[in-house]
Amino acid sequence: MSLVELGNQIKPVILSGVASSGKLTLGNLAGALKNWVKLQDQYNCYYMVADLHAITVRQVPAELRQSTIDVLAMFIAVGIDIEKSTLFVQSHVPEHAELTWVLNSITGMGECSRMTQFKDKSAKGTESSNVSLFDYPVLMAADILLYQANLVPVGDDQKQHLELTRNLATRFNSTYSPTFVIPEPYIPEVGARIMSLQEPTKKMSKSDDNQNSTIFLTDKDEDIKRKIRRAVTDSGTDVTFSKDKPGISNLITLYSIAKNKTIKEVVAEFNGLTYGDFKPAVADAVADYIAPIRDKFEEIKKDKKHLNEIMKIGAEKARQTARKTLRKVYKKVGFLELEG
Ligand code: TYM
């Protein structure tokens, strides 16, 4: 286990990230960011805006710059404390790309082509299928291994990438010598997979063509409420949680997160009531849950100088750690060090 000394405390390490390929969603919050906040006292946390990951899908440069800074501001708006955690932008730490190259040399083509996300995204056509999309999970492994992370809080869709990361770390350690900590995923029991409001068998996503499918953390109250009221539900009328009722189960999950109640408590609360009673309650609860985050985000966004300062400090801290790991890796694989 890697332990980093922080003041007088010894803390295990967390690394996690969000791709800056669009506005953050309620799915991102429920699956990942919520836990980032929760864990920041017990761990030495590195939270990253993954802009290198964002360009695996074509981006408009000016929009990418904006969403990178917006994602950073959103980290703070949801409650990440810059005094406790290191926030940084991935492209400010060149070691991520450098370690990816080394890890590529121990990754099988078959391992990458089996990744569900690659299969889904590349199925959209040849234009969306590029080498970086194929290599994306290796970059993600580099992100995690550079910081010797013990724990990686993510949503369910990243589980397979975490498994690859663990395999690559184990392979590198046995091919050369122990170098990397083998990280564990941290996936929440509730909220690991928030579903689309329009197609509840599909994951809620930043890049869904149908904006009514997704609740963004920047949405206004009335938009949140409208999207939830119009959410696709299943046949029947009872508020019950089950696999064959993905629409209503998704809304129960959202209510449970917004109200900080268990699924069981929510089902009991609405026992005997119908979808017609439940939907407006979910709409109000989620709107109330997101409103303070959105307001804080708008506030933080105004202070560009402060955000730039946070990025500078974060990049320097992240690089210190990343450099140390990369230096070890370069030595182990046989790269020649310059003398003098
Ligand atoms: P990204 O940007 O797609 O999502 C960021 C985080 O949000 C989670 N998430 C969800 N959780 C529940 N329900 C949903 N509908 C939902 N949609 C997204 C994701 O699981 C993720 O935890 N490759 C990553 C970013 C990344 C990363 C890393 C993560 C880059 N390097 C290293 C961890 C460690 C990604 O694109 O996530």
Image (tube, grey):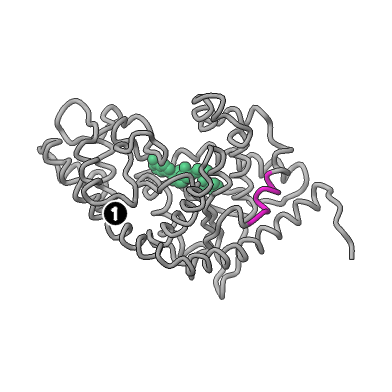
Q: Nearer the viewer, residue 176 or 24?
A: 24
Position in image of residue 29 (x %, y %): 38, 50
Which SS type dominates the magenta stretch? helix
Answer with the quarter of the image where residue 136 lies. Answer: top right
Vertical relation: 267 (above or below) 5: above
Q: Which residue is mark 1?
A: 290
Position in image of residue 41 (x %, y %): 46, 65
* Residue 110 is a magenta residue: no
Q: Residue at x 72, y 37 (%)?
A: 106
Vertical relation: 277 (above or below) 11: above
Q: Is residue 185 visible?
A: no
Q: Nearer the viewer, residue 253 or 222?
A: 222
Q: Residues within 10 Å of mark 1 (few under 14, many from 20)?
A: many
* Residue 99 is a magenta residue: yes
Position in image of residue 83 (x %, y %): 48, 70
Q: For the C terminus, which image quadrant?
A: bottom right
Q: Is residue 332 visible?
A: yes
Q: Residue at x 34, y 47 (%)?
A: 216
Q: Residue furthest bottom?
A: 8
**Secondary element type, mark 1:** helix
Horizontally, is 321 left or right of 62 in the view?
right
Horizontally, is 197 left or right of 136 in the view?
left
Q: Residue at x 60, y 31 (%)?
A: 130
The residue segment tinted magenta is 93-100
Q: Amino acid at mark 1?
A: Ile
